[in-house]
Image (tube, rainbow, N blue to C red):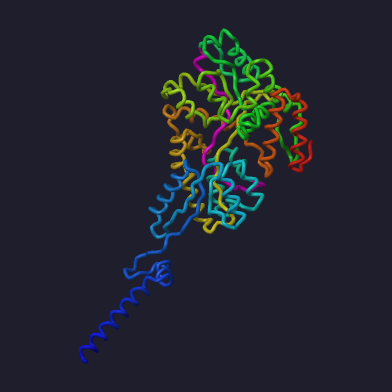
């Protein structure tokens, strides 16, 4: 009997020990203790703070690098990154759906033309409400002025440009040299060069089929607007000014007429209205045209398509901003992707700290050099290797002549009307003057803003 009592006692003690061990790892008390930094050794063991991010594949590794840098510098304030990586077509839908459901991420990457719309909808948190010192002493001092204004809405900064791109006239530098033609600085010079390379004897010499190519309609979508808006700016025109639609002007009509004349005078072809977004520059890369209106982001595509070395790219590829029209000024557009922090963010201050690393000079320089994209930071552009990174260094200078597309919540609808206007005129369906007048009225209707 005594032996049985001992066995029972041993069994009970074993069960109690097991229960005690399980209780120490249960969901409540152990986590709470760790979050307060307490453990038996006395060292900090706080649970990492989760940061929820929506991103694209090219940008995602740099957010990972930024979190790693933060964690190395802040052993007591560790960050656990929860990053969803999407393709561009899914990005907008995912973000708007999440925000509408009250489940927006802490921060995400968005297209710069969405900033006004998202800010107006109340999705975004003004950056100066999180870190006013950074806005005043970094954002406003080191980012090109075009981005300080372009990434703000109603006077408040809402976004940080991660990189930028611009509209260019690409041209075959080697062909121009052989023909004794200078890079175009004005519309007249652009027309003259394009017509020269449209001549049959010149085409027989180089194997091209037309002078210049450009995206001319709805098929190219937003690319048509971003690449052709600089023709309006170089003409002295714009879409909006002082809360009014000012598109219906002689300067706008001159810009649309010039694009139409490129086709009418056989410097280009009416087929441009059916070009997809990258078609024009692919024609240049394959030797089918001497000039194209394209984006700086296409540098890598041109290099891959041609198979040229860095030295050959520098020798054979030329580029200038959109030449001067009636205003006498060259122009270009400044596009790119932005990082934004959401009103629903659970960790807005921490999100800001990580973004300051992601978009800081060190990581930004690494990113733009790796992806052949331009930097929105002046210091990064000025710090580039002028020989190795010659393309980025040269095109970076154009950003002082850059504008952003209209910063307005209804931008998507406005852009569609611009595309329709250009396609209608270039196709010959509608005279340029009429196309501009009709587009101005349509833009007034979709925005509710009066015409000048």
- Residue sitting at x 57%, y 20%: 291
- Residue nearer the viewer, 354 or 294: 294
58 with respect to 398 (left or right): left
Measured as percent of width and height from the top left, residue 372 is found at 47, 33
The span picked out in magenta is 153-177
Q: Quadrant of the N terminus?
A: bottom left
440 with respect to 348 (left or right): right
The extreme top residue here reads 201
Q: Quadrant of the C terminus?
A: top right
Q: Quadrant of residue 114?
A: top right
67 with respect to 92 (left or right): left
Q: Quadrant of residue 110?
A: top right
Tell me, yes or no, whether the highlighted magenta stretch contains residue 318: no
- Residue nearer the viewer, 418 or 351: 418
Measured as percent of width and height from the top left, residue 261 is found at 69, 19
- Residue sitting at x 32%, y 76%: 18
- From the viewer's perspective, is residue 244 above or below residue 422? below
Measured as percent of width and height from the top left, residue 439 is found at 74, 33
């Amino acid at each position: 009997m005594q032996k049985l009592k001992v066995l029972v006692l041993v069994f009970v003690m074993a069960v109690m020990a097991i229960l005690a061990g399980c209780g120490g790892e249960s969901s409540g008390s152990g986590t709470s203790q760790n979050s307060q930094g307490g453990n038996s050794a006395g060292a900090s063991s706080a649970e990492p703070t989760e940061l929820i991010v929506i991103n694209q594949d090219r940008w995602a590794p740099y957010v990972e690098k930024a979190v790693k840098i933060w964690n190395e510098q802040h052993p007591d304030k560790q960050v656990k990154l929860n990053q969803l990586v999407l393709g561009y077509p899914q990005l907008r839908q995912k973000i708007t759906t999440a925000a509408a459901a009250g489940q927006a991420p802490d921060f995400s990457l968005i297209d710069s033309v969405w900033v006004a719309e998202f800010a107006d909808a109340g999705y975004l948190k003004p950056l100066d409400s999180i870190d006013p010192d950074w806005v005043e002493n970094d954002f406003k001092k080191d980012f090109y002025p075009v981005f300080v204004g372009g990434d703000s809405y109603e006077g408040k900064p809402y976004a940080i440009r991660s990189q930028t791109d611009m509209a260019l006239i690409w041209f075959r530098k080697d062909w121009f040299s052989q023909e004794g033609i200078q890079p175009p600085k004005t519309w007249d010079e652009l027309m003259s060069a394009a017509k020269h390379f449209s001549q049959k004897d010149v085409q027989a010499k180089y194997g091209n089929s037309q002078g210049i190519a450009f995206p001319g309609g709805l098929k190219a979508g937003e690319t048509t607007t971003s690449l052709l808006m600089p023709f309006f700016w170089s003409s002295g025109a714009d879409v909006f000014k002082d809360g009014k639609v000012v598109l219906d002007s002689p300067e706008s009509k001159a810009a649309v007429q010039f694009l139409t004349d490129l086709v009418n005078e056989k410097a280009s072809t009416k087929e441009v209205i059916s070009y997809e977004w990258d078609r024009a520059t692919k024609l240049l890369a394959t030797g089918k045209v001497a000039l194209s209106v394209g984006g700086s982001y296409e540098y890598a595509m041109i290099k891959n398509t041609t198979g040229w070395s860095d030295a050959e790219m520098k020798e054979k590829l030329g580029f200038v901003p959109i030449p001067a029209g009636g205003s006498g000024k060259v122009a270009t557009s400044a596009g790119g992707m932005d990082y934004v922090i959401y009103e629903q963010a659970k960790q807005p201050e921490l999100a800001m700290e990580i973004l300051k690393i992601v978009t800081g000079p060190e990581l930004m320089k690494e990113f733009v050099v790796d992806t052949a994209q331009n930097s929105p930071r002046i210091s990064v552009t000025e710090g580039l290797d002028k020989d190795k990174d010659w393309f980025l260094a040269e095109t970076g200078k154009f950003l002082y002549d850059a504008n952003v597309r209209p910063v307005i919540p209804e931008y998507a609808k406005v852009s569609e009307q611009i595309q329709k206007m250009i396609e209608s005129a270039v196709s010959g369906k509608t005279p340029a003057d009429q196309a501009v007048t009709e587009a101005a009225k349509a833009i007034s209707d979709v925005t509710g803003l009066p015409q000048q």
